[in-house]
Image: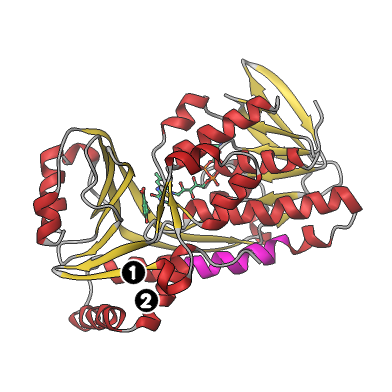
């Protein structure tokens, strides 16, 4: 089998990259380890920056998002009973789109199918070969049979645990990492959201987030210890804890119900540099992870896709490799800005086992944010998404 760009991973990065390349006449094959149903069962991000929403529209997959997604002009940050409304439109003239990652992925699968894109599901034992030569290839097994996929380039869109990053020799890769001593317990429930906008709540008991997928589907999170297991958290215990961490009026309004999904995600900051090895390029979670506070994970994956697809399209049009050489540095600049923002928002709003001095400094930081329009504008500028260039 032969293609121009072999894409490992059929999550949002791999699918969007494939779609953008296809529209520019570049051939791809996607190798995905899981079944499609499994990929679509993962409940993850919910907030799309304008940059991602625009890319989906340009790629012909924005129609359902524009119909069913919700444009949010602001968000609320609370600390006990202090509340701060951040109005994105007023502060920085932009908005975000609330539309689940699952739906983005579903729309991208449909678009790839409509264009007869090749996606090989349940591809096992995927391995990358000769990535630092002009003729890289990928091997995999499917239904017990071995296959070889020759290509010009490999895009490693295979998430944090995939084989692409691991294929880079250790002495060629530098890793920066920070693991937080807590996770987020997330619950999806068929209940009306407590608020029209998202609420990010810092509280002495720990962080909580009220988000949503639609007017009838809510997504809530509470900070839990890294040692906690989902089985430790009955629905009743979850709702009680969430209420305790919200301002009183929100707690009073909260409609509870059975959870239809419940999971714990660990929090980590991680960056691998460089994002290139020869003719292999890392994209999205395979190269970097942000803690979810600030909703940057999926959006960062999308900016990587933008830079890499632009560089590959330019290569196939002109033969020039400059943009491919610049890919890693260009993507990393935006990644580090988002790493900084996600780390800052996580530190500001979560409960750490910290010294009394640090607790007071954090209170002062919140106080400054509540009282300074410039600080609010800085938050809004980062939250809606920094420019792509
Ligand atoms: P992924 O979505 O991880 O896709 C990678 C794909 O590669 C997967 O489909 C995987 O099956 C496939 N793959 C892996 N190994 C192989 C292999 N060996 N061979 C072939 N295919 C392989 N972000 C937010 O902004 N907000 C959130 O609330 C949020 N919650 C999250 C919760 C969890 C549990 C996780 C893991 C992430 C969360 N994120 C969140 C981050 C966001 O979902 C990711 O940034 C986004 O999914 C990145 O997309 P991706 O395509 O790069 O990687
Ligand atoms: C969601 C997740 C986030 O990490 C975030 O900052 C906002 C919303 C969500 O799942 O809806």
Residue 324 % position (x, y): 78, 57
- Quadrant containing the N terminus is top right
Q: Determine whether 341 is above or below 362 in the image.
A: above
Residue at 65% x, 25% y is: 114
Residue at 28% x, 64% y is: 76
Q: Residues within 10 Å of mark 2 (few under 14, many from 20)?
A: many
Q: Residue 56 falls in which quadrant of the image? A: top right
Residue 317 % position (x, y): 88, 49
Residue 93 % position (x, y): 48, 69
Rounded to the nearest angstrom, the CA distance separating label 2 from label 1 is: 7 Å
User: 52 left or right of 132?
Assistant: left
Q: Secondary structure at mark 1?
A: strand
- Quadrant containing the C terminus is bottom right
User: 345 left or right of 135?
Assistant: left
Residue at 59% x, 52% y is: 54
In-front residue for pair 194/302: 194
Q: Does the residue at mark 2 contact the one at mark 1 (Cβ under 8 Å)? A: yes
In-front residue for pair 330/144: 330
Q: Secondary structure at mark 2?
A: helix
Residue numbers of the magenta segment: 327-339
Residue 264 % position (x, y): 30, 44
Q: Residue 11 falls in which quadrant of the image? A: top right
169 falls in the magenta region? no
Residue bearing mark 1: 86
328 falls in the magenta region? yes
Residue bearing mark 2: 376
């Amino acid at each position: 089998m032969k293609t121009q760009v072999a894409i490992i991973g059929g999550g949002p990065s791999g699918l969007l990259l494939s779609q953008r390349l296809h529209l520019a006449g570049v051939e791809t094959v996607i190798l995905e380890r899981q079944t499609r149903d499994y990929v679509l069962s993962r409940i993850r991000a919910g907030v799309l920056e304008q940059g991602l929403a625009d890319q989906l529209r340009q790629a012909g997959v924005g129609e359902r998002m524009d119909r069913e997604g919700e444009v949010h002009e602001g968000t609320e940050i609370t600390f006990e009973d202090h509340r701060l409304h951040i109005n994105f439109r007023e502060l920085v003239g932009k908005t975000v789109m609330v539309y689940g990652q699952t739906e983005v992925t579903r729309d991208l699968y449909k678009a790839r199918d409509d264009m007869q894109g090749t996606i090989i599901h349940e591809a096992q034992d995927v391995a990358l070969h000769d990535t630092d030569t002009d003729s890289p290839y990928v091997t995999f097994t499917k239904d017990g049979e071995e296959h070889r996929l020759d290509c010009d380039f490999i895009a490693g869109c295979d998430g944090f645990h995939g084989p692409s990053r691991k294929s880079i020799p250790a002495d060629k890769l530098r890793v920066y990492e920070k693991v937080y001593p807590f996770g987020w317990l997330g619950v999806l429930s068929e209940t009306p959201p407590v608020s029209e906008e998202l609420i990010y709540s810092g509280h002495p008991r720990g962080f909580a987030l009220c988000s949503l997928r639609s007017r009838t589907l809510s997504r809530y999170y509470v900070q839990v210890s890294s040692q906690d297991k989902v089985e430790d958290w009955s629905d009743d215990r979850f709702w009680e804890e969430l209420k305790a961490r919200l301002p009183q009026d929100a707690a009073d309004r909260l409609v509870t119900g059975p959870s239809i999904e419940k999971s714990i995600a660990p929090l980590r900051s991680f960056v691998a540099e460089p994002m290139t090895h020869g003719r292999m390029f890392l994209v999205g979670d395979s190269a970097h992870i942000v803690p979810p506070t600030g909703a940057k994970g999926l959006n960062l994956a999308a900016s990587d896709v933008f830079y890499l697809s632009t560089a590959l399209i330019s290569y196939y049009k002109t033969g020039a490799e400059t943009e491919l050489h610049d890919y890693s540095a260009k993507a990393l600049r935006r990644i580090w800005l988002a790493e900084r923002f996600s780390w800052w928002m996580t530190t500001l709003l979560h409960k750490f086992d910290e010294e009394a001095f640090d607790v007071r400094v954090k209170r002062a930081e919140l106080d400054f944010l509540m009282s300074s329009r410039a600080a609010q504008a800085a938050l809004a500028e980062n939250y809606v998404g920094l420019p792509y260039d």
